[in-house]
Amino acid sequence: MFTSIMIFILAGLAEIGGGYLVWQWIKAGSSLAYGITGFLLLSLYGIIPTLQDAHFGRVYAAYGGIFVVMSVLWGYGIDGVKPDIWDISGAMIVLGGVGLMMWAPR
């Protein structure tokens, strides 16, 4: 389970970080280097989830939940947007769903 969680976190950092850098390049006028680095990270995101042991659909559905939580954390840590009770509650509900999908006994 630890390895699976670490892969999810690594994939999240690649996707959110890559998207953020492309956003900064296009929307905030940052240099082309931001865009290129962002595209490279987004490409890595396409590879990292293949390291999971579960099936494609389950991995990507569960990753959607991880993406929600990491996006809220990114917004707080990088953009300074403090999550409210609804953000936190929603993220906790989503994490419960991720846990059921990935690690429920089958």
Image: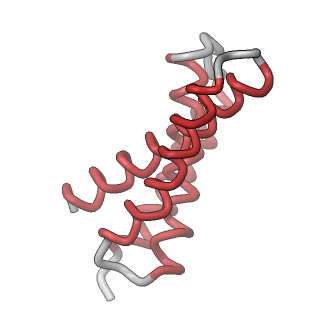
Residue 83 in percent (x, y) is at 62, 22
Q: Position of residue 96 (x, y in %)?
A: 47, 56
- Above or below: residue 8 compared with residue 89: below
- On the image, the x and y values in percent for residue 102 come to 38, 71
Query: Relative to the observer, which residue lies in front, 37 or 7?
Result: 37
Q: Residue at x 65, y 15 (%)?
A: 81
- Give me the residue at 51% from left, 28% from top: 73
How was the colour assigned to the protein in this rendering? Answer: secondary structure
Q: Position of residue 47 (x, y in %)?
A: 42, 64
Q: Is residue 31 left or right of residue 44?
A: right
Residue that appears at 50% across and 17% down: 77
Left/right of residue 36 with respect to residue 84 in the rendered view = left
Give the position of the N terminus as an image quadrant. bottom left
- Quadrant position of residue 20: top right
Residue toward you, 16 or 72: 16
The residue positioned farthest toward the left in the image shown: 2
